[in-house]
Amino acid sequence: MKLVGATDIGLQRNENQDSYRAGHRSDGTAWGVVCDGMGGAKGGRMASSLACAVMERVVEAGLERQSGAPQPPALLSGALEQANRVVYEKACETPDLEGMGTTAVCVLVCGGMAYYAHVGDSRLYLCRNGRLHQLTKDHSMVQELVEQGRLTEEEAENHPRKNLITRAIGVGEELQPDFGAKEVSPRDILLLCSDGLSNCVQVGEIEHILAHMSFFDTAQALVMQALRGGGHDNITVLLIQIEGAEESNG
């Protein structure tokens, strides 16, 4: 597997409240997570950082225990639940952090499958044969209005409350993530991102960059495109490219 990531404060924020982590193992297993924090000057950064750190610890420990035969849905579910508990308890015991939370989108790639889970509006895309496909569906008020037929997709793109999310890690004791799985093939690219990318860069622009840039240059190129698109928010991108057995073994 190939992994590359980048994050940027953007052009209009005072600090970067996004976080990301990723890893891969010699058996070809790879994982990644992107979080976009919320909750005031201190809270957002703390929430996303805590969530990423907890999920990294849980996933790595789970992969080590399972010795190459992971149970991906259970592993991702456990990682999200533990991250939610840690962030929520931290917020409850620290007055300055009250109400903090974070989105999360995570993926675990093994055995020719990408298993994923998410909460909030950070997204997972699959790029296959040059075409980008969104695998996750935003947990947001605007997305709910689209599903109810009260907004079109075009109206949703420019809605003033587009960033109001309906689910997040750390805002309550219970968490309701969505899960999915997708078969992957060599040369497929998985793209995890915060809404700082998806709100500023069109699908066609992402496809162009992924098609014409060297893989290890794509993350920074996507960030730069988001900055050219306005850089209204923090921007984080994480990419995982699937390799065949010959490539993985050198």
Image (tube, grey):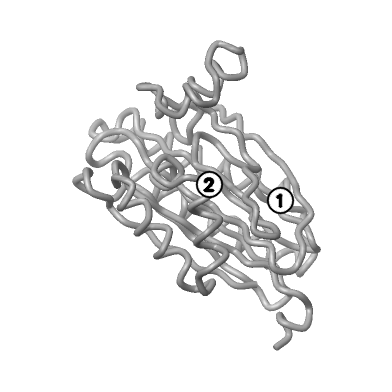
Q: Is residue 59 left or right of residue 87?
A: right
Which residue is nearer to you in this view: 5 or 40? 5
Residue 190 left/right relative to 244: left
Where is residue 127? Give x, y as percent: 64, 56
Task: Using the rendered view, name the quadrant where residue 249 is placed.
Answer: bottom right
Amino acid at pointer 1 = Tyr
x and y, in percent, of residue 15 in the image: 23, 49
Q: Which residue is pictured at 22% across the width and 39% down the height?
A: 41
Asked which secondary structure carries label 2, the reply is helix
Which of 191/168 is in front?
Answer: 191
Q: Quadrant of residue 78?
A: top right
Q: Which residue type carries mark 2?
A: Val
Q: Residue at x 56, y 55 (%)?
A: 207
Mark 1 or mark 2, which is nearer the start of the sequence?
Answer: 1
Which dot marks residue 115? Answer: 1
Pointer 2 with pointer 1, Cβ within 8 A: no
- List the residue tagged with mark 2: 203
